[in-house]
Amino acid sequence: MQDHVATLVRSGSCLCRGVTFRVRGNPLRVGICHCADCRKSNGAPFSAYGVWAVEAFEQEGGFTGTYANRTFCTTCGGRVPWVSEDEAEVPLGSLDEVPTDLVPAYELWVKRREHWLSALPDAAQFGEDRVEGEVAKGA
């Protein structure tokens, strides 16, 4: 029988707050991506995200669209979690509480990282996509 200690709940939304969501518990993993798609979709040199099991994710309100595995509010264009069959990928910038205690454990597509950005200390480094069981550079 599980201990019924209160489970941590994090909330977030798009820019206009028309789409809101909650995630329960801690993420499966937290990472940063420097790929071209993340750069273009965020208008920033990288994106940071946490991945939760889909069972820990709830979303309400608004209308969303999805393009290239990135979901956004169709009213304001703000990024919201992309949900696959078994995981919810949550852009950390869409969480309401800032700063969070979520620390990236890895970086993806580091071959595209800006030269003026340093590698995160203690984070695994992947030249391209993370592959389960793959040994990262510098790990």
Image (tube, rainbow, N blue to C red):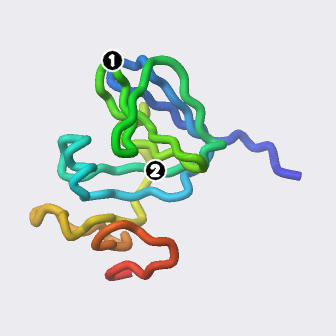
Residue 111: give x, y in percent of width and height.
Answer: 20, 70
Q: Quadrant of residue 127?
A: bottom left
Q: CA distance from mark 2 to mark 1?
A: 24 Å
Camera-near label (2 vs 1) is: 1
Q: Quadrant of residue 58?
A: top right
Q: Position of residue 53 (x, y in %)?
A: 60, 49
Q: Which residue occupies 29% across, 50% down?
A: 47
Residue closer to the observer: 9 or 41: 41
- Residue underneath mark 2: 50
State the residue in front, 16 or 68: 68
Instruction: Quickly name the residue at label 1.
Output: 75
Q: Where in the figure is residue 66, as x and y percent of width and height?
A: 39, 35
Residue type at numbered disc 1: Thr
Depth check: give the residue in front, 83 or 137.
Answer: 83
Horizontal placement of 55 versus 120: left or right? right
Q: Residue furthest right?
A: 1
Q: Residue placed at 36% from the left, 31% from the top?
A: 72
Q: Amino acid at mark 2?
A: Gly
Residue found at the very far left of the displayed protein: 116
